[in-house]
């Protein structure tokens, strides 16, 4: 049995708490919001995970020092916009070499840093890793079979995470490509907004398939330029996560996109979803990375115009369809 501390009491942090408790570990969940912790202590439930009751053995707390110092593993599960601030708060308490696995997904708008980069900058003494893949909290918390990938700088750290998380309903692979894992998880949220917008406009499966496929092409172009590996981008944390986020009823990015496709503003859609919509916060950073690395990402460009420039969603789809003619795979020779 390991002592595992989870930072962030959103749906994903709570879903992981249930998984790790069921694996026999001693689990503590921390939040900076006292009212959130008080509710979890009293109700043992959370409104966005209906039907899931949190076992009495899971500890919910706002106390930070013991939560950090006594843990065998630290799990960073706060929304991406709070990652750096939370890491900065934890930094004085983290031991040299203490393993911290990030399970959130996103990009920082100003710096264009991925989340593991932010944690390393704020907590240089930590052994920082990532766990990602097609994994909605609504299903993980109910024991529905799920598969993810753990990425770390060393095989030893990746295997430690694999051993702690692995169960009959949660399979974990390992990988050294932390960059590729994080990029796939961050960029797919922007494409999922586009897929949701298409759903909101009343388009069909053909449109969804096109957005997923061409969205994957955009993610791959940028990822390879940045140093990610092809195998990662077309694995669980890349194409796998993209598919589930574009298609699932649990996807908050898709739900926000549907609302925007139906005519809501970005602000109205986020308010109605009621949870952090990571794609909105990653969209500008994704476009800035595309410009930095001189990569064409037309879907990401159109999503930014819808979100931040008030462009009508139907016009954005038309502009995508009427782009200049292209060869799908320019490297393939004609016979």
Image (spheres, helix red, strand yellow):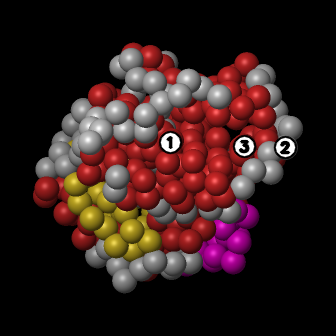
- 201 vs 207, left or right, is right
Location of the C terminus (image quadrant):
top left
Q: Does the image show residue 217?
A: yes
List x then y, in percent, for residue 327. Answer: 43, 34
Instruction: Report the magenta residues as a range.
Output: 42-56
- 85 vs 163, left or right, is right
Instruction: Provide the secondary structure element on which disc 1 rests.
Output: helix
- Mark 3 and mark 1 in contact? Answer it, CB < 8 Å: no
Q: Residues within 10 Å of mark 3 (few under 14, many from 20)?
A: many
* Residue for point 56% across, 24% down: 324
Q: How many marks?
A: 3
Query: As rendered, which of 199 and 176 lies closer to the eye?
Result: 199
Instruction: Provide the secondary structure element on which disc 3 rests.
Output: helix
Q: Report, in whole angstroms, how far the alpha carbon at label 2 lies from the one at label 3.
A: 8 Å
Relative height, residue 303 to residue 68 (above, below): above
Q: Quickly name the residue at label 3.
A: 197
List x then y, in percent, for residue 55. Answer: 55, 78
């Amino acid at each position: 049995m390991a002592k595992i501390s989870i930072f962030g009491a959103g749906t994903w942090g709570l879903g992981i708490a249930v998984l790790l408790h069921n694996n026999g570990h001693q689990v503590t969940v921390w939040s900076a919001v006292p009212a959130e912790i008080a509710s979890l202590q009293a109700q043992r439930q959370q409104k966005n995970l209906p039907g899931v009751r949190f076992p009495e053995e899971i500890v919910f707390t706002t106390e930070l020092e013991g939560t950090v110092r006594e843990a065998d593993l630290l799990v960073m599960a706060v929304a991406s916009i709070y990652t750096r601030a939370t890491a900065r708060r934890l930094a004085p308490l983290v031991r040299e070499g203490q393993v911290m696995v990030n399970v959130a997904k996103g990009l920082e708008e100003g710096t264009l840093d991925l989340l593991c980069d932010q944690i390393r900058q704020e907590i240089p003494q930590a052994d920082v890793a990532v766990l990602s893949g097609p994994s909605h909290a609504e299903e993980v918390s109910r024991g529905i079979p799920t598969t993810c990938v753990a990425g770390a700088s060393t095989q030893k750290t990746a295997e430690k995470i694999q051993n702690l998380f692995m169960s009959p309903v949660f399979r974990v692979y390992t990988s050294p490509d932390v960059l590729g894992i994080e990029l796939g998880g961050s960029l797919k949220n922007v494409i999922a907004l586009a897929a949701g917008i298409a759903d909101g406009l009343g388009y069909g499966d053909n449109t969804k398939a096109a957005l997923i496929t061409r969205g994957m092409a955009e993610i791959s172009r940028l990822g390879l330029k940045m140093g990610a590996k092809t195998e990662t981008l077309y694995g669980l944390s890349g194409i796998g996560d993209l598919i589930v986020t574009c298609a699932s009823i649990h996807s908050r990015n898709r739900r926000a996109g549907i609302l925007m496709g139906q005519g809501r503003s970005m602000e109205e859609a986020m308010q109605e979803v009621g949870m952090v919509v990571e794609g909105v916060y990653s969209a500008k950073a994704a476009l800035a990375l595309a410009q930095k690395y001189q990569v064409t990402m037309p879907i990401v460009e159109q999503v930014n115009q819808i979100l931040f420039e008030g462009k009508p969603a139907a016009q954005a789809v038309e502009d995508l369809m009427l782009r200049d003619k292209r060869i799908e795979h320019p490297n393939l020779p004609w016979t």
